[in-house]
Image (cartoon, grey):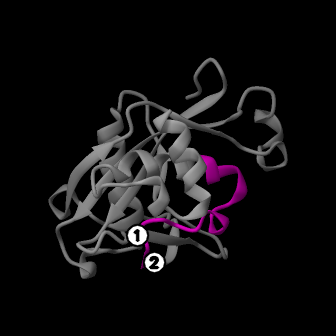
């Protein structure tokens, strides 16, 4: 399901614990780490997709989390052409995402990376909220930056001078 511009509707999930650390999942059989995310199926709302993806990728149910916020609009990224299947290259551009900020109200032991038949992650850890952007695959960095900045207002008072360098310019741009 693509929109007119070639973007696939998707949700992203920033899951925080009581210390405001974020869930960081290691993609199965890869050396890359990311937040849980996944496509919105036809007829599904972004919130329904978020809860489905949360269970499929992390094994958490609605009772394990509390929704703290979501992005106001869609955040988009383009997928590099060489990553796109040949048959999709003329129509598919990338993802457009609604990001959710969730608080884990359950326990770490509630996390189960094998909740579905097609696991996304083979390891996970808690990381500082301000994920080092160079740890994120290059074409997703701007979306991660935008999502974390927008959602941060639900957790703490953010002043540009308190942010890691990679986030400062974007925060100052948003304020002007």
State whether residue 105 is above or below residue 146.
below
> Is 130 included in the stretch rendered in magenta?
yes
| Residue at the front extreme, as displayed | 161
Name the image quarter holding residue 14: bottom left
Please report the residue visible at 35 percent of the width from the left and 57 percent of the height from the top.
54
Residue 156 vertical position relative to residue 142 in the rendered view, above or below: below
SS of the residue at dot 1? strand
Give me the residue at 41% from left, 73% from top.
Answer: 113
Up-down: is 92 above or below 77?
above
Where does label 1 land, which residue? 23
Instruction: Specify whether 88 is left or right of 125.
Output: right
What element does badge 2 sit on? strand
Proximity of marks 1 and 2: CB atoms separated by less than 8 Å: yes
Residue 32 sits in which quadrant? bottom right
In what quadrant of the picture does the N terminus appear?
top right
User: Residue tagged by mark 2?
Assistant: 124
Looking at the rendering, the stretch of residues picked out in magenta corresponds to: 124-142
Q: Residues within 10 Å of mark 2 (few under 14, many from 20)?
A: some
């Amino acid at each position: 399901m693509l929109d007119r511009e070639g973007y696939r509707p998707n949700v992203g999930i920033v899951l925080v614990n009581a210390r405001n650390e974020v869930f960081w999942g290691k993609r199965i059989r890869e050396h890359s780490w990311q937040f849980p995310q996944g496509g919105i199926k036809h007829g599904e709302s972004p919130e329904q997709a978020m809860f489905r993806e949360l269970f499929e990728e992390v094994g958490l149910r609605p009772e394990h989390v509390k929704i703290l916020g979501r992005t106001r609009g869609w955040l988009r990224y383009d997928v590099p052409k060489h990553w796109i299947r040949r048959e999709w290259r003329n129509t598919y551009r990338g993802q457009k995402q609604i990001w959710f900020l969730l608080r884990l109200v359950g326990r770490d032991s509630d996390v189960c990376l094998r909740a579905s038949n097609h696991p996304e992650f083979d390891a996970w850890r808690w990381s500082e909220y301000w994920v080092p952007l160079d740890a994120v695959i290059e074409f997703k960095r701007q979306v991660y930056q935008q999502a974390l900045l927008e959602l941060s207002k639900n957790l703490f008072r953010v002043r540009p001078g308190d942010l890691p360098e990679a986030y400062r310019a974007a925060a100052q741009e948003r304020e002007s």
